[in-house]
Image (cartoon, rainbow, N blue to C red):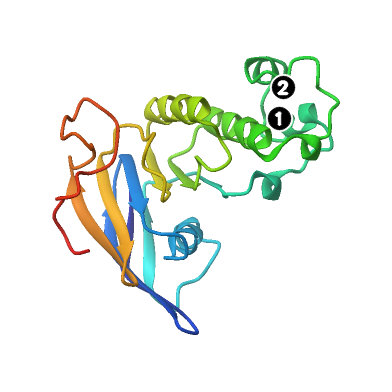
Amino acid sequence: MLIRLESVQVTRGPFTLAADGSFGPGIHLVSGPVGSGKSTLALIMAGLLSPSGGTVCREGIGSLLLSLQFPEYHVTGSTLAEECASWGLDPGPILAAEGFGGLDARDPLALSRGELKRLHLACVLLRPCDLLLLDEPFSALDCRQKEILSGRIAGRGGITILFTHEEEFLPRIDQYWEIAGGRLHDHGAGRHTRSGNNDEPGRPPESAGGPI
């Protein structure tokens, strides 16, 4: 199971992005400041955006899911129950677990963005897939919900790629990538904790190698 970027190039006006690399099973972090191209790369890897050049190769990947930063973009049901069912899931247990028990008929768009994000990600993480692409999954969540989300992400298999500039509540990261200067840089495996203790979640130490 592998997704490989081969000389991928994106050019739109002054914006450019170059990416090479292979993403195998495990949890990958793609970091970078806002506007660096993380969402663009996520769309390319999902096959929803064609690069200006290069190829995206998927090997042994039969299914993929892309979670966009803004959960309202995913809403297709007119009620919370319909929204859960649209993911092929039983609404009752999910709504109860997320604190929405008894609110089956509520309009999803009547929720706050944080509430909707929480429900959306709960549905996403209950759906099995080979490749999961999460674009800014921690946005709109409070600290407690970020911790819970990290634990849920850590418990899944396949390939998971986190595209985020937030690095305070990460699960254990197997491979750390960074978009800087219009290019995707591979900072390698095992450099994923602030303290250098690989038993604790967090970001790579500031001295992590690779181009900046």
Q: Is residue 62 visible?
A: yes
Graded by Cα atoms within 10 Å as few (under 14), some (14 to 19) or many (20 or more), the crowding at tag 1 reads many
The kind of residue tagged 2 is: Pro
Q: Where's the N terminus, which quadrant?
A: top left
Q: Examine the image and state in which quarter residue 199 appears.
A: top left
Residue 58, percent across and down? 38, 55
In the displayed structure, does residue 125 sit left or right of residue 95?
left
What is the number of the mark on residue 84? Answer: 1
- Judged from the image, the secondary structure of the residue bearing numbered disc 2 is helix
Q: Are marks 2 and 1 in contact (CB under 8 Å)?
A: yes
Q: Which residue, given by chain and number where applicable, does mark 2 sit on?
A: 91
In the displayed structure, does residue 62 sit left or right of residue 60?
right
How much space separates mark 2 and mark 1, taking CA atoms?
A: 5 Å
What is the number of the mark on residue 10? Answer: none
The kind of residue tagged 1 is: Cys
Residue 38, percent across and down? 44, 59
54 vs 118, nearest the viewer: 118
- Judged from the image, the secondary structure of the residue bearing numbered disc 1 is helix
